[in-house]
Image (spheres, rainbow, N blue to C red):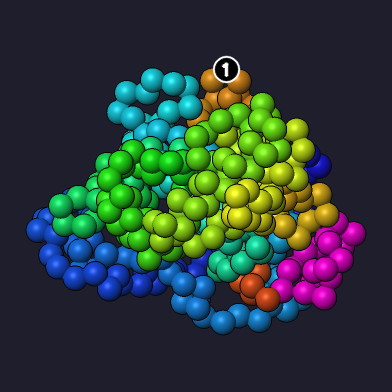
């Protein structure tokens, strides 16, 4: 990947996002010491309209060092386990520590769907991050007896971190298979999907059976994807805007992974995600490939991860801020240094503010 140069970085005060209350009622019965918000105030992800309207100018873009062609970390998570079994597992404490590190560094989460469609509506000076979870494991999401996310799940931890750092927008993307979050009961599956969608999270396609798509015929690829789209529709999820490839393995004909039809069910994704191993350029960059979008595995710096996982890349971006996506605070424009004009797609040229 060719790293995109950025403008000089200046100190920036991030605008705090106001968490919107959920419409759910009731009292969780939890004490205030557990760091959680009671059910009647369960936070929903702030909508884009929650941000004060901003119109970027050459002067304001220069002041925050805006570069909306910079690199974006799309972080890949699998299971959260107290005792890791596989190298790709993370412990809840490791996950929480990584989220807090992101929050302190000025990162604001957006969903994968928002990222690929260019709806990166975050405060001026902030940096987008995409939190993605593969396979729909029970450690990602579960509702307790009060209808709240369990504290020990990924969603529970995300909400805790967002409560501690109000700028950290509590959203993420969950790519699931035929048994979302390990649930076999249809009503519980529907309840889980409804809660996530209602609170701004993305629930999308990871194929029905998690097979290696490269080993399948075009028809087999289409069947795996279309069957999962049917299931998600039954569970109340909107049509998938994005899809993550099982094992990061692309079909022999990459186009079949992005769009196709099987047994009367059609699908078309704005973005298909790989399993690693670098930050991604944004969708307005000429080098952006919607059929093969890079992600970073969440992990430390041991073994293969010395160069390819989140601990390495987040430290690298901190040391090379000129390479990082920095927002101008205005979702209607794309602010970049003048020297990067040639790297932006022609379709977005009218939105560019170059300084």
**Which residue is drawn at the image coordinates 30% and 41% (left, top)?**
184
Q: Looking at the rendering, in which quadrant would you find the C terminus?
A: bottom right
**Which residue is drawn at the image coordinates 38% and 20% (left, top)?**
85
Residue 219 shows in this picture = yes
For label 1, the SS is loop
Asked whether, in this view, residue 334 is left or right of residue 267, the answer is right
Q: Which of 60 and 122 is in front in this view?
A: 122
Residue for badge 1 = 303
Magenta region includes residue 347: yes
Residue 197: which quarter of the image?
bottom left
Residue 65 shows in this picture = no
Residue 286: which quarter of the image?
bottom right
Q: Nearer the viewer, residue 211 or 124?
A: 211
**Which residue is drawn at the image coordinates 37% and 34% (left, top)?**
80
Magenta region includes residue 9: no
**Which residue is drawn at the image coordinates 40% and 33% (left, top)?**
79
Location of residue 125 in the rendering, given as x and y in whole percent from the top left corner: 60, 64
> Which span of residues is magenta-colored?
333-355
Asked whether, in this view, residue 325 is left or right of residue 26, the answer is right
Location of residue 142 in the rendering, given as x and y in whole percent from the top left corner: 28, 47
Q: Looking at the rendering, in which quadrant would you find the N terminus?
A: top right
Q: Image height check: is 80 above or below 41?
A: above
Location of residue 84 in the rendering, given as x and y in whole percent from the top left corner: 37, 23
Asked whether, in this view, residue 33 is left or right of residue 316, the answer is left
Q: Nearer the viewer, residue 14 or 140?
A: 140
């Amino acid at each position: 990947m060719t790293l995109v140069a950025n403008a000089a970085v200046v100190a920036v005060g991030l605008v705090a996002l106001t968490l919107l209350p959920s419409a759910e009622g009731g009292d969780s019965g939890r004490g205030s010491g557990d760091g959680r918000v009671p059910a009647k105030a369960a936070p929903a992800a702030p909508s884009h309209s929650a941000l004060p309207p901003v119109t970027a100018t050459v002067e304001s873009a220069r002041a925050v060092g805006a570069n909306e062609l910079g690199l974006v970390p799309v972080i890949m998570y699998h299971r959260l386990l107290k005792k890791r079994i596989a190298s790709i597992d993370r412990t809840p404490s490791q996950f929480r520590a990584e989220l807090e590190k992101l929050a302190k560094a000025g990162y604001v989460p957006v969903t994968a769907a928002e990222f690929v469609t260019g709806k990166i509506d975050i405060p001026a000076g902030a940096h987008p991050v995409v939190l993605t979870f593969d396979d729909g494991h029970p450690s990602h999401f579960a509702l307790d007896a009060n209808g709240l996310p369990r504290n020990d799940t990924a969603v529970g931890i995300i909400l805790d971190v967002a409560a501690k750092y109000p700028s950290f927008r509590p959203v993420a993307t969950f790519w699931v298979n035929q048994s979302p979050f390990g649930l076999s009961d249809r009503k519980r599956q529907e309840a889980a999907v409804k809660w996530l969608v209602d609170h701004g999270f993305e629930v999308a396609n990871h194929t029905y059976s998690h097979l290696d798509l490269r080993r399948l015929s075009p028809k087999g690829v289409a069947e795996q994807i279309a069957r999962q789209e049917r299931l998600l529709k039954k569970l109340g999820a909107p049509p998938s805007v994005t899809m993550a490839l099982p094992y990061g393995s692309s079909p022999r004909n990459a186009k079949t992974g992005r769009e196709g039809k099987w047994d009367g069910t059609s699908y078309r994704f704005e973005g298909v995600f790989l399993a690693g191993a670098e930050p991604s350029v944004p969708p307005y960059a000429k080098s952006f490939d919607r059929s093969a979008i890079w992600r970073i595995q969440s992990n430390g710096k041991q073994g293969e991860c010395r160069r390819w996982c989140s601990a390495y890349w987040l430290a690298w971006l901190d040391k090379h801020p000129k390479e990082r996506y920095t927002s101008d605070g205005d979702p209607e424009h794309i602010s970049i240094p003048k020297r990067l004009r040639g790297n932006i797609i022609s379709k977005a040229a009218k939105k560019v503010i170059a300084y």
